[in-house]
Amino acid sequence: MSTTSKVLKKLYYILGEKSEGITVSEFWNYLFEDKELAKELVFDGERREGIVVGLQTRIRKGGKAVEGIKIIKNGEGKNVFILNNNNLNYLAGVSNKYLKEATTVKLEVQDYVFNKSEQLIINKYGNALEELERLNSDLEKIADKIFGKIIKTDNLKNEKIKEEK
């Protein structure tokens, strides 16, 4: 199996685990966790950047070699690999990450007392965060259901192809 094929296989595996997607730099970190693959990704002490760059080009152009993966720009303007067939999963993962952080922060300002209308806004904001958490949890369930059906469909397709051979 070629190094590029191994890298692509690793990308599919990681994206199956990381529904929120991964940046290119995060992907390199995952690649180097695999010690055997890491040996193939270095030449003369330098990282073989062309492997991931070539993969990105193939993903952008589309085609059967990289079905099910796309690259999008996240809110920070970074390229992120995500599974193409379930954007709900990506959105729920990203939302969950930020909601966890936002809901741990207590809504207060030191040395300031809110008037009635300001406190109402603060309360509404807190309630909206809680509601968004509930909705995001429901969205994750829908995304997981869809992802499960996609996996079953892919497995059935693979079985049919094996039977035809």
Image (cartoon, rainbow, N blue to C red):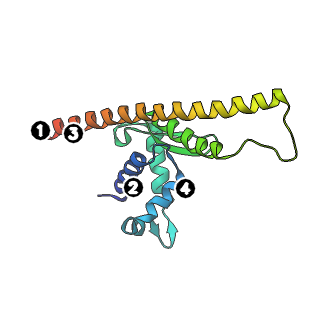
Task: Inspect this view and state whether residue 15 appears.
Answer: yes
Question: What is the crowding at mark 3: few (fewer than 14 residues within 10 Å), some, or many (at least 20)?
Answer: few
Label 2 to label 1, Cα distance in Å? Answer: 28 Å
Residue at 65%, 31% (x, y): give it: 127
Label 3 to label 2, Cα distance in Å? Answer: 21 Å
What amino acid type should be assigned to the residue bearing mark 1?
A: Glu
Q: Is 155 situated above or below 40?
A: above
Kindly identify which residue carries mark 4. 25
Label 1 to label 3, Cα distance in Å? Answer: 9 Å
Residue at 22%, 35% (x, y): give it: 157
Tell me, for residue 163, which label it has, or none: 1
Residue at 41%, 30% (x, y): give it: 142
What amino acid type should be assigned to the residue bearing mark 4?
A: Ser
Contact (CB < 8 A) between labels 4 and 2? Answer: no
Kindly identify which residue carries mark 2. 7
Disc on the earlier residue, 4 or 2: 2
Label 3 to label 4, Cα distance in Å? Answer: 32 Å
| Residue 7 screen position, x and y as percent | 39, 55
Front label number (3 vs 2): 3
